[in-house]
Image (tube, rainbow, N blue to C red):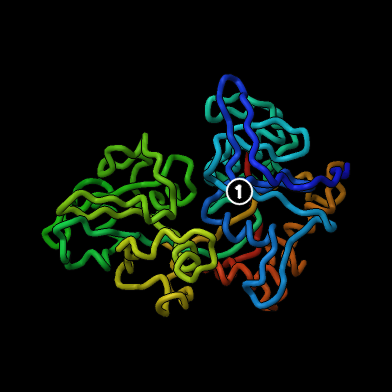
Amino acid sequence: MKMKKVVALGAALGVTLAGIAIAAPANAEPVSNSYVLVGSDTLQDAGNALANGTTLSGSNVRVTAGGNTLGSFDAFGSTAIQTKPNGPFFGRPSGSGDGVKALSRSVDGTAWVKNGLSVNISGQVDIARSSSGPASPNIAGPLLYVPFARDAVSYAYKLGAGVTSAPGIESLTASQLTQIYNGTLTTIGGVTVVPKLPQTGSGTRNFWIGALGVAANPAGVPDAATTTLQENNAGQLTPAANTIQLIPFSAASWIAQSNGATGVNTITGTNVLLGAIGGVAAYTGTGNALVPEATFYASSTFGRDTYVVVENARVEEGNAKFDQGLFDLINPSVAKSLTNFSNSPASSGAVKKKFGFLAPSTQATQRANFQ
């Protein structure tokens, strides 16, 4: 069924749902006239640029579905979103885990419960952005993970007042990071180090604890189960005097923010730095001309492929639910698809490079169960 073409929402509006006041932000997100993307904060800026159109690569690039625009929704913002014409308002999916869960509820019809709202969101989400692959792949699962780009994760750190130096903090080893998060190493260079994590459901959080081999709520992070810190936001680091805070940070997001590719820069002027794990930097260059360091991105521990996730049946040729428009959006051979990574300035791949991503290590897809 083709969606009716609608005009993007251009003005803020307010509604009340289930006793909760919901106000759209002044810069309101659009109601989609084709397909909807939600989920990962790490992928949202590149996803937004592709959906909304950009000239960052030197050419005008915009991913559409047969000429119809996509709706890409941020991981953070208003309490609830409306994604399609006359669709329900529902709790905003915040992060990779939420994105995949919302897609699952959009397909299986089970109520989506978020931010105090329990809503049937059948057909309201088409694509989830995920900064990590499936925890438990299943070759017969109803979801399909399609490689989007290659990223890597390091740690951002900030010195608190009274700390002028902490030798070693700039190049912690993987072993030291594991000990810090386990709570068995509490000082670096004679200074107390306080590890932090993004909110539960963050793909970057899940990847980081997996890379370090620590528990989901590691002993070194007392508020791990309740934290609401946003991933890839340097402003989230607010160390107390005479301490250092650190948190996992997407290398691609660091590069994109530093280079001015994103609409928001949380790095400049915050005195936050990106560590070089084991002495291997995540990027090369200075100022607003950073590029990924291929060696770090290739790490089997700290490098990661990121994904867009769809319902497998809708992109399986011959299936009764096959959707050509969605198939084209996740087909890497299509120059202006979400998954393309060619070098042409007119391609999606060139745009993603401006956001600090490299080509994924493989084009192999993975299937998985609903979340």
Could you say where residue 357 lies in the image, as x and y percent from the top left?
Answer: 54, 67
Note whether residue 311 is visible: no
Q: Residue furthest top?
A: 19
- The quarter holding residue 270 reads bottom left
Q: Is residue 129 left or right of residue 315?
A: left
Where is residue 131 drawn, in percent x and y? 53, 53
**Left or right: 282, with 184 as reference point:** right
Residue 281 vs residue 291, the one in the foreground? 291
In this view, 367 is above or below 45: above
Residue type beneath disc 1: Asn
Residue placed at 84% from the left, 43% from the top?
3
**Front residue of this view, candidates 223 and 331:** 223
Q: Residue at 27% across / 59% down in the picture?
A: 158
Q: Quadrant of the N terminus?
A: top right
Residue at 48% x, 73% y is 292
Q: Which residue in the structure is indicated by mark 1?
A: 27
Q: Residue at x 66, y 71 (%)?
A: 55
**Which one is in front, 299 or 148?**
148
x, y (%) of residue 93?
57, 39
